[in-house]
Amino acid sequence: MYLLIITMKNKRGFTLIELVMILVLVGILAAFAAPRIGDIATTKAGAFVDKLRADIRYAQDLAMTQNRRYRVYFNAAPSPNPGYAVVNDADGNGTWGGAGEVATDPAGSGSLNIALNTGQYSGITFSAVGFSGNYVEFNSLGVPFDSAGAFAVNKVITLSPGGTTVTVTAQTGAVN
């Protein structure tokens, strides 16, 4: 009988000291996690920058391997606004991005036509696009152009939030 009473006494629950220690540990974890939660939009924008760089490089690669000019349109038809699309003018009719002229997205199935400020890209937009005509075009040598001609200086795309930039280098078309 005595054994039973001791066993029941030990099953009362947590002591006040144990509860205070748990609350202190949760508080410390929350203090470290809270600042990172606010940076989710900036983190998403950083990940998007990597995708944008890869897609611009992809347009350049397509132009060089297919011996056909490719354009990346920003915020202007045939791309969504806000967004971008990788297109060509395969039939030579002067209309870029017509039927069968939108590049296939190498990261998934479908067209390389990215809508911003929605879905996985919510909160991300272009705050400035430094290309004349809202596009960058690559010839079969990989040289970048816009509506003003071949780049004489580097051109920059700035993203929001965070002001992260993507630069297309004049003459070489290197994307940084």
Image (spheres, helix red, strand yellow):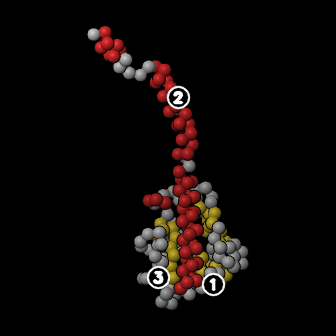
Q: Tell me how far mark 2 sits from mark 3, CA to CA.
A: 60 Å
Determine the secondary structure under disc 3.
loop
Few, some or many residues within 10 Å of mark 3 (<14, 14–19, 20+) = some
Query: How many numbered circles does the render carry?
Result: 3
Return the residue nearer the eye: 1 or 118.
1
> Residue at the spot x=53%, y=85% of the render?
66
- The residue labelled by disc 2 is 24
Above or below, comparing residue 79 to residue 28 in the picture: below
Q: Residue furthest top?
A: 2
Q: Identify the image quadrant of residue 36.
A: top right
Q: Position of residue 92 (x, y in %)?
A: 51, 90
x then y, percent, for residue 108: 44, 69
Point out which mark residue 141 bears: 1
Q: Position of residue 174 (x, y in %)?
A: 65, 73
Q: Earlier in the sequence, mark 2 or mark 1?
A: 2
The label number, if any, that marks residue 118 in the structure image? none
Q: Which residue is mark 3?
A: 101
Distance, label 2 to label 1, CA atoms, is 62 Å
Up-down relation of residue 107 to residue 123 (above or below): below
